[in-house]
Image (cartoon, rainbow, N blue to C red):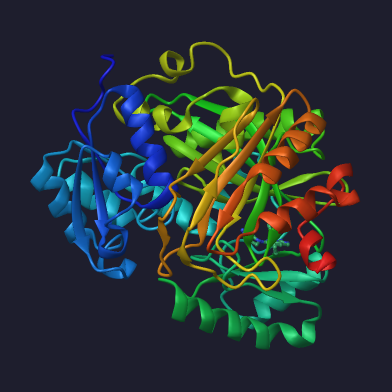
């Protein structure tokens, strides 16, 4: 395959990930088109892309989520592919379908796979069918309160109700007894119907203090699948991840190997292609249970890039161009050393309320083992309309201890003036005994605040 797989790529996103995609395209020698809202006119993706087109006002619904505007921009600029990044249209199967019909390559899985993985209880059934461990729960969606009570009595309380079209924590209800189940089911179905495309709800055994472990996947369009190790994303608050690392300090080699082997077969059977993440919960015993598939590149992908040396965004582009995984990876995937990512958000570190505004002073850390993915610059503005991510600070070390030491050093040298950021919060997390020992779960922040 030629070294330039596409003639031009449109980046259908903003912020640090838009810049990250532009960088991958530059490394591949592919010209780029940035699309931007009126709020992002002076942003770095606009500056560093080869072309830039304004697609609408600040509000996402009228810009980064506006399919006709983005397709028009793609047609006007004559691109042959679109990279959706994360969030926005990245897991919208209709958008992927519109791209297909418009003969523009969507850099991601097929619309069919995106759609199937978006139905959580379907994904769960498919994984079970291929021997990937899942939690005890309902077989498919719940059709009545009686069926819900019957299932919950069988598996034992507490249980959790989840919206089939949900994900990321929305539309969930924890149920502690049969008495409260019918009422909470009604609530969950109501909320699911109002928030998502479907009111369908399913039920699972509830794990009270899990760790969040996710596997990074790359799959080509010829049926080959590789798993690039896992990330531990347990340090989060209200479903917003704060810090991620790879490898997980809690995952045993035995379970890692077993789950990776089953997962690989399941993803081949699904016909998965491009990059993806498969989320699991780890229980107190250290066992993993599948929860959902994220059919996109994720915010925290750099920690996997640091331990594997694989450029995941570049791999996504080459996969979309039809290249084979063996030509992209050149040899077996080896995970080496340890990487940690701190998400630097524009927010008050005590209250977590957003803190948009102008960056009046900025010093970005560097040096051995440090990577900063950011669209921030001196005098740049963090607008209030989008997520509050300002930068991702990634530290790599030969082992976890070295990665932590380098992260602390980099946080000390990281200066952002004019807005509040989560830098002080990260400094505190890195000094917590449970973090240092690696003995935390998803309740770490809640317990501590
Ligand atoms: C769970 C769970 C406990 N038991 N499922 C939240 C996000 C979504 N991806 C799945 N989530 C959860 N599912 C069962 N059966 C607890 C959570 C959960 C969670 C999971 C990962 C990271 C942070 C979390 C915070 C609260 C709840």
What residue is drawn where x is 32% and y is 23%? 28
What residue is drawn where x is 25% and y is 20%? 4
Q: If the image is split into quadrants, where does the N terminus sit?
A: top left
Q: Quadrant of ligand 1?
A: bottom right
Is the residue 259 above or below the residue 296 in the image? Answer: above
Of all residues shown, which one is farthest toward the front?
361
What residue is drawn where x is 31% and y is 58%? 40
To which quarter of the image does residue 83 belong?
A: top left
Can see residue 272? no
Left or right, 102 with reference to 161: left
Q: If the image is split into quadrants, where does the C terminus sit?
A: bottom right
Is the residue 55 above or below the residue 163 in the image? Answer: above
Near-viewer residue (404 or 245): 404
Near-viewer residue (165 or 335): 335
Horizontal and vertical percent position of residue 448? 84, 65
Horizontal and vertical percent position of residue 46? 27, 47
Can see residue 195? yes
Left or right, 113 with reference to 70: right
């Amino acid at each position: 395959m030629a070294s330039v797989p596409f003639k031009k790529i449109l980046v259908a996103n903003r912020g640090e990930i838009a810049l990250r995609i532009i960088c991958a395209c530059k490394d591949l020698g592919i010209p780029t088109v940035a699309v931007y809202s009126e709020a992002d006119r002076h942003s770095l993706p606009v500056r560093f892309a080869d072309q830039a087109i304004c697609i609408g006002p600040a509000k996402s619904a009228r810009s980064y989520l506006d399919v006709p505007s983005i397709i028009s921009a793609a047609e006007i600029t004559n691109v042959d592919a679109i990279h959706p990044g994360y969030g926005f249209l990245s897991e919208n199967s209709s958008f992927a379908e519109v791209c297909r019909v418009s003969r523009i390559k969507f850099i991601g899985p097929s619309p069919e796979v995106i759609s199937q993985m978006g139905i959580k209880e379907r994904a769960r059934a498919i994984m079970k069918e291929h021997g990937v461990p899942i939690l005890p729960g309902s077989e498919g969606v719940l059709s009545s309160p009686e069926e819900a009570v019957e299932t919950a009595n069988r598996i034992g309380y507490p249980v959790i109700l989840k919206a089939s079209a949900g994900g990321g924590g929305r539309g969930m209800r924890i149920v502690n007894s049969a008495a409260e189940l019918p009422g909470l089911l009604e609530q969950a179905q109501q909320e699911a119907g109002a928030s998502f495309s479907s009111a369908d709800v399913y039920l699972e055994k509830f794990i009270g203090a899990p760790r969040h472990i996710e596997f990074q996947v790359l799959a080509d369009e010829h049926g080959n699948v590789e798993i690039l190790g896992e990330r531990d994303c347990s340090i989060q608050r209200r479903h917003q991840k704060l810090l991620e690392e790879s490898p997980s300090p809690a995952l045993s080699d035995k379970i890692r190997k077993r789950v990776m082997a089953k997962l690989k077969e399941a993803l081949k059977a699904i016909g998965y292609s491009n990059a993806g993440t498969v989320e699991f919960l780890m229980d107190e015993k250290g066992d993993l249970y599948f929860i959902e598939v994220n059919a996109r590149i994720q915010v925290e992908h750099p920690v996997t890039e640091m331990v594997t040396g694989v450029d995941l965004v570049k791999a996504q582009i080459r996969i979309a161009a039809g290249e084979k995984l063996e030509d992209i990876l050149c040899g077996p995937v080896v995970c080496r050393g340890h990487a940690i990512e701190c998400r630097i958000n524009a927010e008050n570190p005590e209250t977590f309320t957003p803190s948009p505004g102008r960056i009046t002073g900025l010093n970005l850390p560097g040096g051995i083992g440090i990577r900063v993915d950011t669209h921030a610059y001196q005098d740049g503005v963090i607008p209030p309309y989008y997520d509050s991510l300002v930068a991702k600070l990634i530290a790599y070390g030969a082992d976890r201890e070295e990665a932590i030491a380098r992260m602390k050093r980099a946080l000390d040298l990281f200066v952002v003036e004019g807005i509040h950021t989560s830098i002080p919060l990260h400094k505190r997390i890195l000094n917590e005994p449970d973090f240092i020992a690696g003995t935390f779960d998803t309740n770490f922040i809640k317990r501590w605040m």
